Image (cartoon, grey):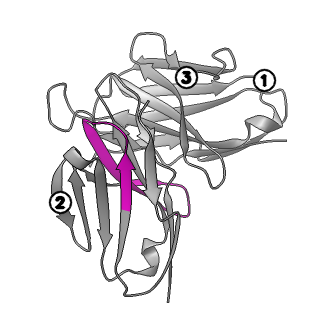
Amino acid sequence: GIQVEQSPPDLILQEGANSTLRCNFSDSVNNLQWFHQNPWGQLINLFYIPSGTKQNGRLSATTVATERYSLLYISSSQTTDSGVYFCAVLKTSYDKVIFGPGTSLSVIP
Amino acid sequence: GAVVSQHPSWVICKSGTSVKIECRSLDFQATTMFWYRQFPKQSLMLMATSNEGSKATYEQGVEKDKFLINHASLTLSTLTVTSAHPEDSSFYICSARGGLAGHPAYNEQFFGPGTRLTVL
């Protein structure tokens, strides 16, 4: 099955700093999503991005499907950005979604 | 975006009892819902895929008699942990696939807030 890796596993940022999170996957995919899991456990959809680039406020994401990776950019980080960021991929509509191990982000004041 | 609710948000029960967790899609119809389990500081592990009107598909290693799944309508799936034991304590999360077949966002998943189960 598809292997999903995320880096870095842990990240500590000063408030206001920028960061880039990476997701690598081992096979072609039809779907890729980025999620933020807040400290209460809620998974929040950030991007549905099988390919291309999308932006939403301080966050943006780029997926290069041919090279099997996706990047999540966080600019001007805030303490509320803390939590775990997961990427999840789906090969076809009939396959299960595979989650990466996550990147744990802590933004300190 | 689409909204998925879960109830209860947390539950504490005695060993040997059964616990039912509900997952509802509030503003869309979901022919397929998914149940995940998450241990502390770990990623989500898919337990089963729930299809409306048919039997759930369980992942390898997940006991179907232990974790009963029912998807009775296009907006409701339930997970019942039968004869719960302390090792079943975990965070259970459901998700629903939004959009119509053929729509570009068909495979986008929306997650419920999760249910924290503690078995004493």
Q: In the rendered structure, which disc, 1 or 3, sits on the residue that comes first in sequence?
A: 3
Amino acid residing under circle 1: Ser
What is the chain letter for disc 2?
A: A
Question: Residue A105 in the image: x percent, y percent?
Answer: 49, 70
Magenta region: A22-44
What is the chain letter for disc 1?
A: B
Quadrant where the image shows the C terminus of chain B? top right
Is disc 1 in contact with disc 3, using a CB cutoff of under 8 Å? Answer: no
Residue A21, image quadrant: bottom left
- On screen, residue B21 versus residue A66, left or right, reads right
Amino acid residing under circle 3: Glu
Residue assigned mark 3: B59
Q: Which mark is residue B83?
A: 1
Residue at 24% from the left image edge and 35% from the top image edge: A30
Is A97 in the magenta?
no
Q: Which mark is residue A54?
A: 2
Residue A50 in view: no
Question: Residue B31 in the image: x percent, y percent?
Answer: 33, 22
Q: Secondary structure at mark 2?
A: strand
Q: Is residue B40 above or below residue A105?
A: above
Distance of mark 2 from mark 1, alpha carbons? Answer: 46 Å
Is disc 2 in contact with disc 3, using a CB cutoff of under 8 Å? Answer: no
